[in-house]
Amino acid sequence: MKLLEGKTAIVTGAARGIGKAIALRFAQEGCNIAFTDLVINEAAEATEKEIAALGVKAKGYASNAANYEETQTVVKQIAEDFGRIDILVNNAGITKDGALKRMTEDQWDAVIAVNLKSVFNFTKAVQPVMWKQASGSVINMSSVVGVSGNANQCNYSASKAGIIGFTKSAAKEMGLRGIRHNAVAPGFIITEMTGVLPEDVKKAWEAQIPMRRGGTPEDVANTCVFLASDLSSYVTGQVVNVCGGMNT
């Protein structure tokens, strides 16, 4: 039997990159997928078809994860369309890097809203559904820079560290209803975003990694399968570093 057979997952920011890899990997394990992104464009429509081709129900929804009311509306619609929500992956995120002395208020606010407030928005929206079911797994995408910090990423690091605190607190609140909350902290993952970096920059990153390579979106997705499935039924409030040993 597949690990996520018959379950339904919401994956935010899943039109491409790590979110898409998670959605596809979940679908391979029999999970129905509702995914959100800021707009449902041709790329998102292609992702929907790719997921559906794996024999599960799949639908993409246009939603701004940083907007509380939009999130309430889209989660209500997903619950109606799919009948249940077993898994939430809070993956939506952006970067607006820069030195603190030059960082604008808009750069700070945008990253905190998309990366951190979105986690509150979606977790708050799915809580009544999971509470009624007396089960659920929420997986929040943090980062190694939320664990250890990084120069020129004060806004991003703060948002990802905030996710860890949120995850640990929510786990303590909702454990009595069988709702688990865990965070994943990816390290240097090769995606479209990092793929455009100069080769010398990528080599410098890899030199800091004990395994001497960048990770793949599938490395992150496989960890999420474990946290979403009953294999991790007694794991909650944890941060799993998927970083090749960068943070040990």
Image (spheres, rainbow, N blue to C red):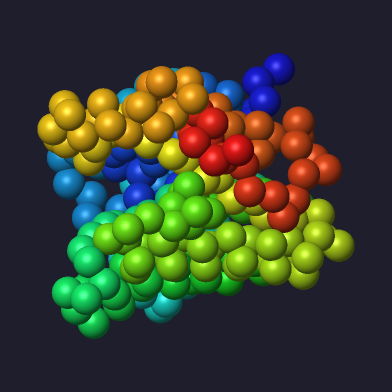
Taking 233 as reference, is 100 left or right? left
Do we see residue 210 in this rendering?
A: yes
Do we see residue 33 in this rendering?
A: no
Q: Is 144 or 58 nearer to us in this picture?
A: 144
Rendered position, 98 above or below 1:
below
Q: Residue at x 35, y 50 (%)?
A: 13
Q: Residue at x 73, y 61 (%)?
A: 171
Q: Residue at x 17, y 36 (%)?
A: 197
Q: Is 25 or 104 nearer to us in this picture?
A: 104
Q: Is 203 or 53 nearer to us in this picture?
A: 203
Residue 17: horizontal and vertical position, in percent? 31, 37
Residue 16: horizontal and vertical position, in percent? 29, 38
Q: Residue at x 44, y 72 (%)?
A: 117
- Of the 4 image quadrants, the one containing the C terminus is top right
Rendered position, 127 above or below 59:
below
**Residue 177 picture quarter:** bottom right
